[in-house]
Amino acid sequence: MRRRVVITGMGAVTPLGHDVKSTMEGQLAGKSGVGPIQQFEARTFPTTFAAEVKGFDLAQHIPENGPWDNAGPNTRFAFAAAKQALAQAGLLQDTKTDRSRLGVYLGSGEGVQDFHAIMWALSRTYDPATRDYDVPAFTRYALELFHPQREAEQELHTTAAHLARYFGLEGPNLSCLTACAASSQAIGEATELIRHGDAEVILAGGAHSMIHPFGVTGFNLLTALSQRNDAPSKASRPFDLHRDGFVLGEGAGMLVLEELEHAKQRGAVLLAELTGYGSTADAFRVTDSHEDGRGAIACIRGALKDSGLSPDQIDYINAHGTSTKVNDRAETLAVKAVFGERAYQVPMSSSKSMLGHLIAAGGAVELITCIEAIHRGWIPPTINYETPDPECDLDYVPNQARPHRVRHALSNSFGFGGQNISLIVSRFES
Amino acid sequence: MSVSSRRVVITGIGTLSPLGAEPDTLLARLLAGESGIARISAFDPAAMPTQIGGEVLDFDAKTYITDKTQRRALKMMSRPLQLAVSAAALAMKGVDRRQIDSTRFGVEFGAGLIPSELPELGEAARLSAEDTPARVNLQRWGQLGIPTIQPLWMLKYLPNLPAGHISIFHDAQGPNNSITESDAASLIALGEAYRILERDGADFFLSGGCESKINPVSLVRQCLFEKLSRRNDQPTTACRPFDQNRDGMVLSEGATVLVVEELGHALRRSATPLAEVIGFGAAFDRHQNGQGLAQAIRAALRQAHLTPDDLDFVIGHATGHPDHDAVEARGLAAVFGPHGIPVYAAKAALGHLGAASGATEVAIGILALHKGVVPPTLNYHTPDPDCPVRVLTTPHTVQKKAFLKVAYTSLGQCAAAILKKWE
């Protein structure tokens, strides 16, 4: 018998609130977290809006000073979400658990580059005639202008390390960054580490923000973002005929994954069971997902096989649903390929219609949404769904939350670059 | 701990490092006591506090990538990505691709932050900078700057794209992950590939890592927050792991890709196993006293069903960092006893390949097992009482069948892998 993995804690910081409750209730109310970008002057960018986390102050969650003071929003959101998750799991003040059996696996993003310092130093040292820059002169500016600690905190392993040190998690400590699939992949691989016996408990999830000048520039250049600047809250419209790209979001989602017997012995609340994990690559193009959803099909099938469930047993799908032309069409095709006729009976909604795309953190928050759906018996809608797309003809739970009994839910995350992850969570049943 | 009947072997090595592009050459040069460290030539490092590093000189990805479509894709890749796909091509050289099921073919890669190559942002910066230091006018950036940048700019720098491109080049549709655990990244990637193969999630993996910090932005950043050696006038003796006079790390660049596969799969396609992966462990060194490293090593030993005495040598993380070397030495001493096991420090000769270092040094260990001799550590002259390790300074004849590779990040993430000679 393989070791079973349950979820015993959850935490979130999202554009709809600073905890799981407000994030879920906002979604059930069909609220949009999208608005004009406040963090920097974006009025002349091709896209001027995003789903930002509002009014967040880390000091309300973590009163102490530490390296996170110099960290980007990714690490700051991660701390607040991790604290909520560990508190719910009863592992914050706990002294009985062997800390060497508690690990961390994050799919978390980079910190924020010092756009102004680096671009200004470049501007002073760049010669348009040669299209090159004077490296020694650039170096001198950089040594003067770059903030050493803030630079250090941009590195990709810092978030997982700071969480482990602060919360006393001395087991395996890992990070991955597979774009939009990252936190789902972290949760899947963390589940496997527990199944294998590498740890009893893993804090798994992700945190990310790309709402900064380089991030918006990069996605705008790829023409991946919606440019519906006159109606930001209407811009994220997954599966709608008039969708024109995704909306950047930011935030964090954290889950405490735990081996079942370990959780029972501690008397932890068993929120759900992680029953299925599938992982594939499109191996197609770095810019697009495979037109026929090849990788996504294999990925969903992999998660079903891992869980031992048949497609008939899945009650709800939280879609990757980015609101890009290609993704929503390919994901629809993939779900039809795997579920057959049943695809039309399984409600599938996109949290991204309200939260935007949290990139590396998206999968974790969406999995939490699935678990909340199991508990509440309500599934969130896809908002801004106005004009059906003939190529997207499934039940996307348009615009209104719906009461629905959910025993098993599937969450898809497909990364830019071709990484696909599907996770299945189930109501806990002994 | 669950027991799997599936065994995991390494059947191929592709490596590009400051000491060459052939595994056998790499080992020969290490055995000859050569150093890959020199004054940086890729750009003028004159204003850098640290001006030395390990470069892959005369690197041209087209040497390794011959397919037309793939060559076109090179334009979308920064240097670390090009190093990665080149090392992958080298690793796949002897593999008959038709014998591998695409859906059972995965990629596990270690990668770090990849900085922008600045000239392509130069025009945008020039058009939008203010006179005030460190101020860019974002309205001008949006209006005038953004249109001057190449549409696919961002794709050159995403850390999941080394693995993404490799999956496309080799039609690898299995699990695909990019581990971003800094200096431990590619060792952890190997550990994850090993776990996935054990649990029957794939049959065949390309697992490795890539990094180039020989880039003005990377190097200046690292100068600001890392302890780098400042022995600019003596590059080849600058990196001195465990030596009392060590003054910091030396950064370098490269990529190593290992072919990692399930034993039966390897034998069915008549591949020659070079080594077997028999144990892996990871932990966090919360108090930065070596206990986490010891914990990771013990976990790997337990899985390998070995005792510390069964290991012949360790390839240390051993960067030449004043503090981290001492922590690592304490961790090793906790498991093997003070001066208890021969330790080889490859970074003295190669420099620190960052996210690629774990895979590169695993490759060196495998080559040493085969050759029956471990290279001497360069630049170790004055033992440090704070580093109670037995550093190999002369070629060491291998007597036992297994070795340990460890990795350690600046913040305390630890990984340990045990590999055994294939028989």
Image (cartoon, coloured by chain):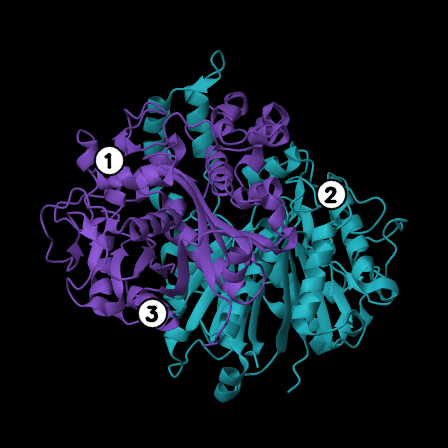
Chain colours: A cyan, B purple
Residue drawn at point x = 17 percent, y = 29 percent: B233
Q: Nearer the viewer, mark 2 or mark 3?
A: 3
**Disc with the residue nearer the chain's start (1 vs 3):** 1
Where is residue A398, by image quadrant? bottom right
Residue A330 appearing in the image = yes
Chain letter of the residue carrying label 3:
B
- Residue picked out by circle 3: B301
Total residue callouts: 3
Name the residue carrying label 2. A245
Judge the density around disc 3: few (<14), some (14-19), many (≥20) Cα neighbours within 10 Å. Answer: many
**Residue situated in front as seen by the camera: B145 or A39:** B145
In the displayed structure image, the side of residue B249 where residue B203 appears, left or right? right
Q: Amino acid at mark 3?
A: Leu
The quadrant of the rendering that contains the C terminus of chain B is: bottom left
Q: Which residue is mark 1?
A: B35
Query: Looking at the image, is mark 2 or mark 1 nearer the viewer?
Result: 1
Please report the residue visible at 47 percent of the width from the left and 13 percent of the height from the top. A130
Q: CA distance from mark 2 to mark 3?
A: 50 Å
Report crowding for label 1: few under 14, some 14 to 19, many 20 or more residues within 10 A (C-alpha): many
Q: Position of residue A222 (x, y in %)?
A: 66, 35
